[in-house]
Amino acid sequence: MVAVLVGKFHARDAEGRVYSVHEFQESSPAGAEPGASAPVSSYRLAIGDRVTHLGGDDFELLQSGVKMTRTP
């Protein structure tokens, strides 16, 4: 699978800290059967920490459990 950066945004936690989040879209490798799987989005901080999308504008840092909200 290949991950391609498709977006960047900022998210803020309850204490007001701002995080730079990168959104990646993972696709099947070349030569895979078309329509075999839909692209999957994944999220990481700029420093590499993994982020879980909770739905809507809500996210959570996987390692620490810090919850954050996407800022407009």
Image (spheres, rainbow, N blue to C red):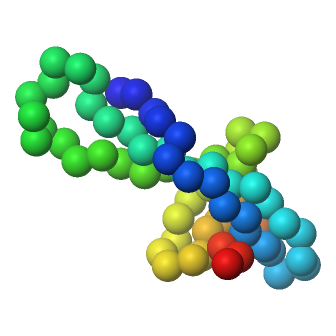
- Front residue of 70 and 72: 72
Coordinates of residue 61 in the picture (x, y in percent): 69, 59
Give the left or right position of residue 31, taking residue 57 as reference. Answer: left
Q: Residue at x 89, y 77 (%)?
A: 16
Query: How far from the left and from the top, in percent, is residue 57?
Result: 57, 77
Q: Residue at x 49, y 79 (%)?
A: 56
Above or below: residue 46 compared with residue 33: below
Please state the total of marks drawn on the protein image: 0
Q: Kindly tell me whether residue 69 is visible in this rendering.
A: no
Which residue is found at the position 36% from the left and 27% from the top? 1
Task: Give the answer, above or below, for where 59 lies relative to 42.
Answer: below
Which residue appears at 78% of the width and 40% of the height? 47
**In the picture, which quadrant includes the C terminus?**
bottom right
Rendering coords of residue 46 (x, y %)? 74, 44
Q: Is residue 37 visible?
A: yes
State the image quarter where residue 12 is shown: bottom right
* Residue 20: % across, % down: 75, 55
Q: Nearer the viewer, residue 5 or 16?
A: 5
